[in-house]
Image (cartoon, helix red, strand yellow):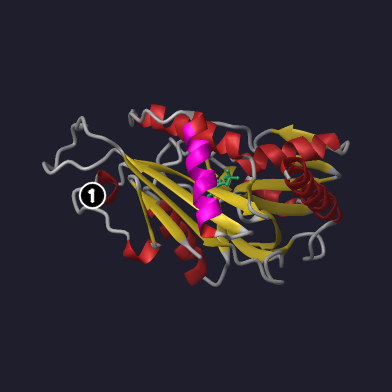
Amino acid sequence: MPVAYLNGQWTRPEDTKISVFDRGFMFGDGVYEVMPVYKGHIFTLAQHIARLQRSMAEVRIQCSMTAQEWQALLEEAVSRSNEQDALIYLQVTRGIASERSHVYPVVAPTILVTVTASQFDEDAFKPISVTCKADFRWSRGDIKVVSLIANGMLKNEAMDEGFDDAILIRNGMVTEGTSSNVFAVKDSVLWTPPKSEYLLHGITRDQVIQMARGSGLEVREENIQEAFLKQADEVWLTASGLELLPVGKVDGKTVGNGEAGLIWHRIKSVFQAEILKVIEKID
Ligand code: PDD
């Protein structure tokens, strides 16, 4: 059953109310995380907590919660929801200030957690079709902020043009997807853009790199030109909840044979094995 936590209160998500003066609502002044839950266990929990704490430090949201307290709260949320395969949404905003001002108020942060069942169906890993779009977002994509208006604009523009999503290009180079990181395979080498301030340092990205290297694949964290992307043998998007999603077409050009490639299959099965290992280790 979906569950929500707001500043100490447990409720149903649809009954949870946020103040109109919440800075997350008025200014998009907040940060967030999305975490996958497999068989009741939170995957890569420590990494998500560490990234949340970094995002909060970058935007100077003060919160006294320790990593252990975050872990306890999130585990309680999963156990109260009783969901086995789910997504946790965790949002921390600067808090409530009745005077609308660009100056940061000294107030307690708002902490919101929801747990909802994940909906994986047989289409979840069907190759998608993407278009390349100019990345006009701000240049601090490494902070996971709740203001996602630009990401939404880019995704919806792509969809209006008949694509499933967009891959974003800044100065001729791939940055990331609208809500994912990007990988390309060329001649059995796996490429992904290096970490920078222009893209989110995805936790799934780190996992995929580690798994690929562990399985003997050469991985290059180097810039990917738009033209290179269109010549790639395989293209994938990665994100929590999405895992590795194959891309079958880029701007109408078929990638490989349009199906999920050999290396995708290899890393996908390592990913599944890793999830099983995590579950078994905890149980
Ligand atoms: N988004 N880049 C962007 C812009 C993202 O929004 C996301 C994830 C990622 C992948 O990060 P990770 O592997 O840590 O989930 C990259 C989440 C899932 C969302 O906004 O729903």
Q: Residue furthest left?
A: 99
Specify whether residue 74 is painted magenta. Answer: yes
Q: Residue at x 55, y 72 (%)?
A: 162
Q: Is residue 61 visible?
A: yes
Q: Position of residue 144 (x, y in %)?
A: 45, 41
**Which image quadrant: the C terminus?**
top right
The residue that appears at 69% across and 49% down in the rendered structure is: 229
Q: Quadrant of residue 173?
A: top right
Q: Nearer the viewer, residue 78 or 152?
A: 78
**Observer able to see residue 199:** no
Left or right of 44, for residue 6: left
User: Residue 215, relative to residue 85: is it above or below?
Assistant: above
Q: How many marks?
A: 1
Residue at (49%, 50%) from the top-left corner?
Answer: 77
In the rendered image, the vertical position of residue 256 relative to residue 223, given as above or below? below
Q: Is residue 283 left or right of residue 226?
A: right
Return the x and y of residue 161 as percentages of the image width and height: 51, 70
Placement of 274 over or under 264, stated as above or below: above
Graded by Cα atoms within 10 Å as few (under 14), some (14 to 19) or many (20 or more), the crowding at tag 1 reads few
Q: Main secondary structure of the magenta part?
A: helix
Q: Which residue is mark 1?
A: 26
Q: Secondary structure at mark 1?
A: helix
Depth order, front residue of 18/197: 18
Specify the segment rendered in magenta.
69-80
- Report x, y in % for residue 184: 73, 47
Looking at the rendered structure, the kind of residue marked 1 is Met
Residue 234 belongs to magenta span: no
